[in-house]
Image: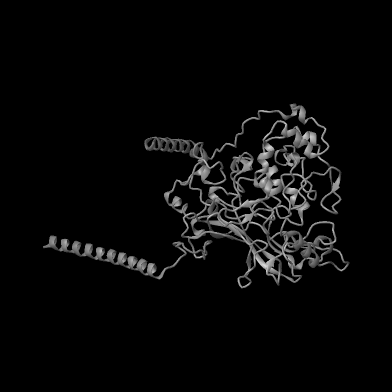
């Protein structure tokens, strides 16, 4: 058995080596070809079940399931459906239905708005599991190729079935989609499908992540070398591969250091959502650069800034100022000198950023959250909504870039817990309908099941978001001086010695001693040569 195991290992190593030899030259070539995709094996316009007419989107799903018999159950087993994640390292139950964030707070009490990005229809109560009907899965949001299908923002995942105005008071009407046309034109997911939710997290384009916004639908080569339409033209699913509809690349457990390396059949973790999956563990031709891979994430050097595509990301959100009205008693909307929204009566004050330099931290992929029922340590401010785990001595850690979202959000001054806010809805207790904080917090607490004393204030918070998209071309990656200089980007990080930036008194003394000894040796060598030359000349004269 041992011999057989060795033989298999050798064959696997040979396979990886051959694949690497074939792949790496392609990756390093200037003439990179765009991602080729196999032609479809089914023309959905020919399917009788998809001819319609359809009176509702779930009717389309029912038609899809007549052929894709297992797809519904597969989707229901994913975090895209459950919005739950049981973290094996921290023991916390996470997911959109459980965590509180520093943007709109929690999904609970705001379901119809937030579940417009659920891959299903009709999840209106976050205290209950998602709908159980087989046709409640939304196939079209991921597989529409017409660009005409859109989950209306306030209908719990349904597209509108009548003309509706959106945005509110804009005068723009959103018409019901032609469901039969959309159904007959389904296909593989592309950037528009994923981006319809992931680019607009936090309520608007680019607000939440910093490295995900609508500029990635048709990015330039300078913005993202992988997704540029005139280059590799990757879709999201080329890296975020799926297995039975389970998509690789969870933010709740990041693969911060992929030691598996190049992903090939027989040597795979069933996902390519890491740089090493294609580029391997020694991606540079220069050995010295490869020495950095052990401690630095690829993203640290190759994403020099985020929000680079002309879409600003939100960096500060102060809920404490929400509710102010103008002199006529009407809600206000103000913009800053760059044209970005700086104040809304519904949401408070904002600050936005473009071309933002990331902040850096050791990261092993694990993130621990301050959940809604956790008692805050008010001696340690600001409150960390999440903490990224990792350290210099942790072999699974690397230095990663992050967007750090800052702001103020409500907390209970008696129980010392964060508070969920009921912001959305036409009822009298939603903040966006009456600007009454006590009512909104009381309702949010009742729905979330967390006690509310009635006493509240606002507290500063931070939240880390790993940066991993918007990969710049190699010639625009950080140069050595970005870190090895007095103004190093990594200044203050523990556990690393960076020549050109770091200082150690004994190393400095030893270095200067070596320099002085070298100069002394050169001087002595010169004097000796001069002495012996003159001696030879004197001997010849005699």
**Residue 343 falls in which quadrant of the image?**
bottom right
Q: Position of residue 517 (x, y in %)?
A: 30, 66
Give the camera-side residue of 215 and 189. 189
Q: Is residue 140 shown left or right of residue 55?
A: left
Give the camera-side residue of 294 and 231. 294
**Residue 142 falls in which quadrant of the image?**
top right
Q: Position of residue 100 (x, y in %)?
A: 68, 59
Give the camera-side residue of 168 and 248. 248
Q: Which quadrant of the figure contains the N terminus?
A: top left
Q: Is residue 426 shown left or right of residue 488?
A: right
- Residue at (87%, 66%) from the top-left corner? 329
Q: Which quadrant of the figure contains the C terminus?
A: bottom left
Q: Position of residue 50 (x, y in %)?
A: 77, 31
- Residue at (51%, 36%) from the top-left corner? 265
Counting every numbered tag in the picture gives: 0
- Residue at (37%, 36%) from the top-left corner? 3
30 over 299 or under it: above or below: above
Res 132 visible: yes
Q: In the current view of this chain or complex, which residue is farthest to the right?
A: 328
538 over 150 or under it: above or below: below
Q: Is residue 404 shown left or right of residue 256?
A: right
The colour mode here is one colour
Res 228 visible: no
Q: Position of residue 51 (x, y in %)?
A: 79, 30
């Amino acid at each position: 058995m041992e011999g057989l195991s060795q033989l298999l290992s050798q064959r696997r190593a040979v396979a990886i080596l051959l694949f690497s030899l074939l792949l790496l030259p392609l990756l390093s070539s200037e003439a990179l070809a765009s991602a080729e995709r196999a032609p479809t094996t089914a023309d959905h316009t020919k399917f009788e079940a998809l001819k319609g007419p359809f009176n509702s989107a779930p009717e389309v799903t029912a038609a899809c399931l007549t052929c894709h018999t297992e797809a519904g159950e597969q989707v229901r087993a994913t975090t895209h459906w459950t919005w739950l994640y049981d973290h094996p390292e921290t023991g916390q139950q996470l997911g959109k239905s459980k965590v509180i964030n520093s943007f709109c707070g929690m999904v609970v009490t705001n379901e119809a708005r937030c579940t417009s990005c659920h891959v299903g229809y009709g999840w209106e109560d976050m205290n209950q599991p998602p709908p159980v009907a087989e046709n409640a899965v939304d196939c079209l949001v991921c597989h529409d190729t017409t660009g005409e299908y859109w989950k209306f923002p306030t209908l719990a995942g349904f597209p509108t079935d009548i003309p509706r105005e959106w945005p509110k008071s804009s005068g723009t009407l959103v018409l019901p989609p032609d469901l039969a046309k959309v159904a007959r034109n389904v296909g593989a997911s592309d950037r528009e499908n994923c981006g319809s939710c992931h680019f607009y997290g936090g309520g608007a384009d680019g607000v939440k992540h910093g490295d995900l916004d609508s500029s990635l639908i048709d990015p330039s080569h300078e913005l993202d070398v992988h997704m540029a339409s005139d280059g590799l033209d990757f879709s999201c699913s080329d890296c975020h591969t799926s297995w039975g509809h389970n998509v690789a690349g969870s933010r709740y457990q990041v693969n911060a250091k992929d030691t598996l390396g190049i992903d090939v059949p027989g040597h795979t973790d069933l996902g390519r959502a890491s740089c090493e999956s294609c580029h391997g563990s020694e991606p540079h031709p220069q050995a010295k650069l490869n020495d950095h891979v052990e401690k630095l994430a690829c993203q640290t050097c190759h994403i020099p800034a985020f929000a680079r595509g002309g879409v600003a990301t939100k960096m500060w959100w102060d809920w404490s100022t929400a509710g102010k009205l103008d002199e006529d008693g009407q809600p206000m909307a103000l913009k800053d000198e760059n044209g970005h929204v700086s104040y809304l009566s519904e949401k408070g004050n904002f600050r936005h950023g473009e071309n933002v330099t990331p902040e850096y931290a050791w990261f092993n992929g694990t993130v621990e959250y301050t959940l809604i029922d956790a008692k805050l340590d008010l001696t340690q401010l600001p409150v960390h909504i999440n903490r990224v785990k990792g350290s210099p001595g942790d072999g699974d850690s690397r230095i990663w870039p992050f967007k750090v979202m800052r702001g103020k959000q409500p907390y209970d001054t008696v129980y010392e817990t964060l508070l969920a806010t009921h912001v959305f809805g036409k009822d009298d207790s939603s903040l966006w309908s009456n600007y009454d904080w006590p009512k909104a917090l009381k309702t949010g607490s009742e729905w979330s099941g967390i006690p509310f004393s009635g006493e509240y204030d606002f507290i500063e918070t931070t939240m880390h978001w790993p940066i991993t998209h918007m990969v710049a071309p190699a010639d625009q990656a950080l140069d050595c001086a970005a870190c090895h200089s007095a103004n190093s980007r990594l200044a203050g990080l523990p556990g690393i010695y960076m020549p050109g930036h770091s200082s150690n008194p004994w190393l400095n003394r030893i270095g200067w001693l070596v320099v002085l000894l070298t100069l002394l040796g050169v001087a002595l060598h010169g004097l000796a040569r001069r002495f012996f030359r003159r001696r030879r000349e004197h001997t010849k004269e005699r």
